[in-house]
Amino acid sequence: MKKEAIKVDHTNPVISIRGLKKAFQDYAVLRGIDLDLYQGENLVVLGRSGTGKSVLIKIISGLLKPDEGEVEVLGRNIATISDDELQALRIRIGFSFQNSALYDSMTVRKNLEFPLVRNRRNLTKGEINKNVETVLDAVGLSQTINQMPSELSGGQRKRIGIARTLILNPEIMLYDEPTAGLDPITCIEINDLINEVQQRYNTSSIIITHDLTCAKQTGDRIAMLLDGQFQRTGTFDEVFATDDERVKPFYDYNFIK
């Protein structure tokens, strides 16, 4: 499916990163990166495995602390806010985990109810049911409401994981390798869903991937992480219009086999 044009507000960064550094023992993963995510934008962070892509979104969500630099999310400095403020901020951020992170002992309904019961305690049972039905419809899986995660395909689990994130109406979505381990047809369906979420929920998203088809189909802008820094940013075609030997083989592997 061709990605619809989205109006991105380039005057309004919802995430702003400056001089971010992170090392593990003697290995510097992020070496002073700058990055902005703008309102309404799907930004793809592209790179090989082990280049620090997942570390970046863990820092954004406050799961890891940076060694240096500043990270502002929705106007709040992650390093200086209190634990309570960080928890309140996380509710405004949707985190789609690589493994979907569903509770195996709960039905789809109970998996989707869980974040509402935990974070929206004033909702009635009827309001909870309506929210569950709405997000299941949004991901095209209304028929799975009473199934267990073990009864779902990999692609269905990904969709339910995204639905559970959407149920709190996040302003920002963070997708960690959303197409990992899926067959090509299911990958296309997940890419289409990411675009539908952007349009339907007006989200701003960071999509972490090394899948160039995912990057090309979902990204309004691409930021390529090489050697701990963003070496190339722009549209998909702009990023790959290069003879850089660190970039060209990456493209060739994905598209020329």
Image (cartoon, rainbow, N blue to C red):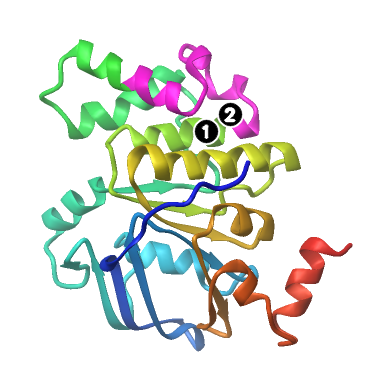
- Residue at x 55% of width, y 43% of height: 99
Q: Which residues are magenta?
A: 132-156
Answer with left or right where residue 249 lies relative to residue 26.
right
Element type where label 1 sits in the image? helix
Q: Compared to 140, does 42 lie above or below?
A: below
Quadrant assignment, res 164:
top left
- Residue at x 38% of width, y 37% of height: 200
169 in magenta: no
Q: Which mark is residue 159?
A: 1
Check contact, mark 2 vs mark 1: CB within 8 A: yes
- Residue at x 71% of width, y 87% of height: 244
Image coords of residue 195 (percent x, y)? 49, 44
Q: Compared to 113, does 198 lie above or below?
A: below
Q: Compared to 41, does 88 lie above or below?
A: above
Image coords of residue 183 (percent x, y)? 74, 40
Around disc 2, counting alpha carbons within 10 Å, would you say few (fewer than 14), some (14 to 19), or many (20 or more)? Answer: some
Q: Of 162 and 191, which appears nearest the observer? A: 191
